[in-house]
Image: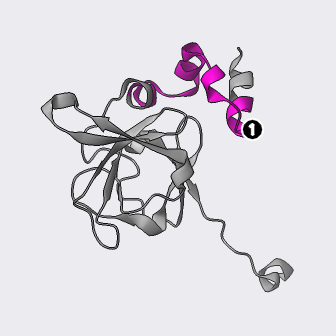
Amino acid sequence: MTINQARQIIASGGDTALIPTSAWKQILTPEQYRILWKKGTERPFTGALLNNKQPGTYVTAGCRLPVFHSNHKFKSGTGWPSFWEVFNKDNIVLKKDWSWGMRRTEVLSKCGEHLGHVFDDGPDPTGLRYCINSEALAFIPEATPVSVDALKK
């Protein structure tokens, strides 16, 4: 499979399970690949999206699935982007994770990408804290509305 074919599958929302490891390694940065497909974690306070305050949608870095929205983001002080709610629950899978000698709940995209973990120490109204790696996400800013008057100038 060529990289262009893999990108077409992603863009069309096709079956990303058809994309081979070799293609993912070319599409993603080495750090994104390590986090998304090897269940890695970025160092705290290093992620590019940690302090992002722009309005918009967070999609997964590989499969490009919308998973979080800026309206649900909050500053948790943990060093990773944190959200109290999922934007599109159909795109998220929760899985028990017993690694590192502790019980956690892993957050994956529906195509299998490791995004981070969810904890029950978040703010109201959900009480949840989705602790997500910046490298696992891409940010799509909301379009700035253009007024008709601005177009006439």
Q: Nearer the viewer, residue 133 or 17?
A: 17
**Rendered position, 43 above or below 54:** above
- Image: magenta residue range: 8-34
The secondary structure making up most of the magenta span is: helix
Query: Which residue reaches farthest bottom?
Result: 149
Residue 10 sits above or below residue 143 on the image? above
> Looking at the image, which residue sits at the far left?
101
Tell me the quadrant of the picture where the C terminus can be found: bottom right
Please say which color scheme the image uses.
one colour
| Total numbered labels | 1
Q: Residue 5: where, in percent of width, then height?
A: 74, 23
* Residue at image location 24% in from the left, 57% down from the top: 120
Question: Relative to the observer, which residue lies in front, 142 or 112?
Answer: 112
Residue 10 percent location from the top left of the image: 67, 34
Give the residue displayed 53% in from the left and 39% down from the top: 110
Taking depth in this image into account, of 153 and 80 the one nearest to the observer is 80
Label 1 environment density (alpha carbons within 10 Å; few <14, some 14–19, many ≥20): few
- The answer to which quarter of the image holds residue 32 is top left
10 in the magenta segment = yes
Image coordinates for residue 36, horizontal then vertical, percent:
43, 31
Relative placement, left or right, of 10 versus 25 is right
Does the stretch in magenta take in 108?
Answer: no
Circle 1 residue: 12
Q: Secondary structure at mark 1?
A: helix
Q: Tell me the quadrant of the picture where the N terminus can be found.
A: top right
Identify residue type, mark 1: Ser
Residue 146, how many percent across, how many down? 74, 76
